[in-house]
Each structure stands twice: as C-alpha cells, then as structure tokens.
Image (cartoon, rainbow, N blue to C red):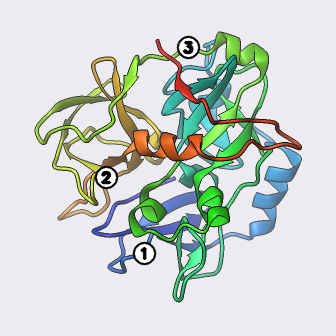
C-alpha cells in the first residue's frame, strides 16, 4: 500500500492487490482505480486470508506489539497504536489499509457521497486479519470511513484525514499485547522537532489542514508495507505513518495524521454486535 499526500486530498489506487494513493490536483479525499478484479479481494475477505505475508509469518515474537506487521486481505501495513477497553485490546492501523476498490477513476473520500465524490468502500466489520505475534486472527471492529458515512459527516478535514481502523484481539492475544509508548500527543509537534519513525530518525514540519496533518521535513526511505509505522517522540506517540513520499524531482513529504482526534471520534461510536462484539466508549492507550 502506498499513500501519498497532496495539498488537499488523495487519490487511492489498487494495482496488483496493492492499495496506493497517487498525487492528484483535485481537492478530494481519494480516488479508487481498480486494475484487478474485485472478486478475488472480496473472496479473500469472506473466506479468510489464504496466506500470510513474510512480515506476518516470519515473526519470532509471541505477542502483538506496536509496529507489528498486519495483513488485511492482500494489503500489508503496521500496527500504529494499541488501545484497550477493559481487558480487550485493539490494534490500530490506517483505515486505508482496509479500503476496497470502487469505480474506475471516480473521486472517493472517507465520508458519504456528494456530487463528484463517492464514499470509500471498506472491508466489513468481522473481517479476519493477521497480525504478527498474534496466536489468532484479529477481527475488524471499527472503521472510521464507514462510521463517518453512517453518521452523515461531510466536513472536509475529517472526511479526508480521520483514518483509523481498530482490530479486536482475542482474549489471549489481548493479555499478551505489548505497547512501546506511554501517551498520545494531542497537538501537532512544532516544526523542527526531532522524532522517530519506527527506529529511524525523522523531523517534523509545520502541521497543515487545521492540525490534522503532520508532514515530515526529514524522514527515512519508507516502503508501502511500512504504512502505519508509529511516529514517536520519546515515549509519546505522535501518530501513524499514513502518507509516503511520491515523485522524483519534487517529492511530496511523508506524513502522519492527528491520531488523538481519530481516537476521540472512535470513542463516540456505538457498540457493535454480531460477528464481532466491541465497544469503544472508554478507549484508553495501552501503555508500555
């Protein structure tokens, strides 16, 4: 999965079962362009994941931790945050990791349809997900895209940058989960602040879009499968890598989104029942 920031939105592409956001001039959240049949993707979601990615399968860890590899159907990313409600632990990843292809070339964003825009299609609640270190598959319990669509939110910044999926771990995996952070930063880091993207050094640039987007003026080379990697300052979590550089001459910067706001919005979502049972009204950070 490749996600690339633009001045006011994103273009989401699926190519060879890989989600990618490509630079566009339109002020829209994303656009889906399918170059593979949707049927195999849906089949993978409904029937479970046929095979784990190397990052998921090869791990020697016996517990889920921040930064662990994640596979949703054929899309690979990282666990950016671990939250809990009581004894139940949720692994957080960008909502883009669970997006599905829609109509060729039609602008798409995370909220409901508007003239010239279509609502993002997402993997359904209950979708089984592999996480490195987990003994059992987690289940998709919350998706910020489908939540905003159900609530009828149409505000530009949340529709573009409220980007969070919560994956419910089993009781055994919840008990064993390990976080590497102790707090989540509520506001954007100051420009020039030294940060860590995973284990590599990074530097914050000035935030944009009313504090929703945290661009990085300096960041390591990242690949598509690193989307979701925690962005930290000491033991404080800033956000998750959600946008990776694109272009050759004038590269767009890597960026994270305001995770604190996304978690707050998730905490107002109603409980879900059925294939997966989950509540989010008392979400708290799993502290390391």
The answer to whether residue 17 is seen in the rendering is no
The numbered mark, 1 or 2, whose residue comes first in the sequence reads 1
Q: Is residue 215 left or right of residue 99?
A: left
Q: Position of residue 280 (x, y in %)?
A: 65, 36
Q: Is residue 185 left or right of residue 53?
A: left
Residue furthest to the left in view is 192
Q: Which residue is mark 1?
A: 28
Check if mark 3's residue and mark 1's residue have beta carbons within 8 Å.
no
The numbered mark, 3 or 2, whose residue comes first in the sequence reads 3
Q: Position of residue 94 (x, y in %)?
A: 52, 46
Considering the numbered disc 1 on the image, is that residue within a helix, a strand or a loop? loop
How crowded pointer 3 is (Cα within 10 Å; few <14, some 14-19, many 20+) is rated as some
Question: Residue, x 54% and y 25% (percent of image)?
Answer: 284
The numbered mark, 3 or 1, whose residue comes first in the sequence reads 1
Alpha carbon distance from label 1 to label 2:
15 Å
Alpha carbon distance from label 3 to label 1:
36 Å
Check if mark 3's residue and mark 2's residue have beta carbons within 8 Å.
no
Q: Is residue 21 left or right of residue 171?
A: left
Residue 237: quadrant of the picture: top left
How crowded pointer 2 is (Cα within 10 Å; few <14, some 14-19, many 20+) is rated as many
Of the pair 138 and 277, the residue shown nearer to us: 277
Asked if residue 255 is positioned above or below residue 155 in the image, the reply reads above
Considering the numbered disc 3 on the image, is that residue within a helix, a strand or a loop? loop
Asked if residue 196 is positioned above or below residue 40 in the image, the reply reads above
Q: Position of residue 62 (x, y in %)?
A: 66, 11
Question: Residue, x 76% and y 39% (percent of image)?
Answer: 51
Q: Position of residue 117 (x, y in %)?
A: 53, 81
Residue 19: quadrant of the picture: bottom right
Q: Which residue is mark 2?
A: 213
Q: Which mark is residue 178?
A: 3
């Amino acid at each position: 999965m490749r996600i690339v920031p633009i001045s006011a939105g994103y273009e989401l592409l699926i190519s060879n079962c890989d989600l990618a956001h490509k630079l566009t001039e339109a002020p829209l959240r994303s656009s889906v362009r399918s170059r593979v049949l949707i049927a195999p993707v849906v089949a993978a979601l409904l029937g479970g994941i046929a095979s784990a990615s190397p990052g998921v399968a090869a791990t020697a860890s016996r517990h889920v931790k921040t930064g662990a590899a994640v596979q949703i159907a054929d899309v690979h990313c990282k666990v950016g945050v671990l939250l809990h409600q009581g004894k139940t632990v949720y692994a957080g990843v960008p909502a883009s990791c669970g997006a599905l292809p829609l109509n060729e070339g039609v602008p798409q964003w995370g909220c409901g349809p508007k003239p010239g825009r279509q609502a993002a299609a997402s993997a359904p609640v209950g979708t089984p997900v592999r996480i490195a270190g987990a003994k059992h598959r987690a289940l998709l319990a919350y998706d910020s895209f489908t939540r905003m669509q159900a609530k009828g939110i149409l505000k530009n910044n949340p529709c573009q940058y409220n980007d969070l999926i919560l994956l419910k771990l089993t009781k055994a995996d919840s008990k064993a989960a390990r976080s590497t952070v102790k707090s989540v930063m509520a506001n954007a880091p100051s420009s020039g602040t030294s940060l860590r993207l995973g284990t590599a050094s990074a530097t914050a640039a000035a935030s944009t879009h009313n504090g929703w987007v945290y661009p990085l003026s300096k960041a390591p080379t990242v690949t598509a499968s690193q989307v979701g990697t925690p962005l930290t300052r000491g033991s404080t979590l800033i956000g998750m890598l959600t946008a990776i550089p694109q272009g050759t001459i004038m590269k767009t910067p890597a960026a994270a989104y305001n995770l604190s706001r996304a978690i707050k919005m998730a905490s107002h979502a109603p409980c879900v029942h059925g294939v997966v049972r989950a509540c989010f009204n008392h979400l708290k950070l799993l502290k390391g």
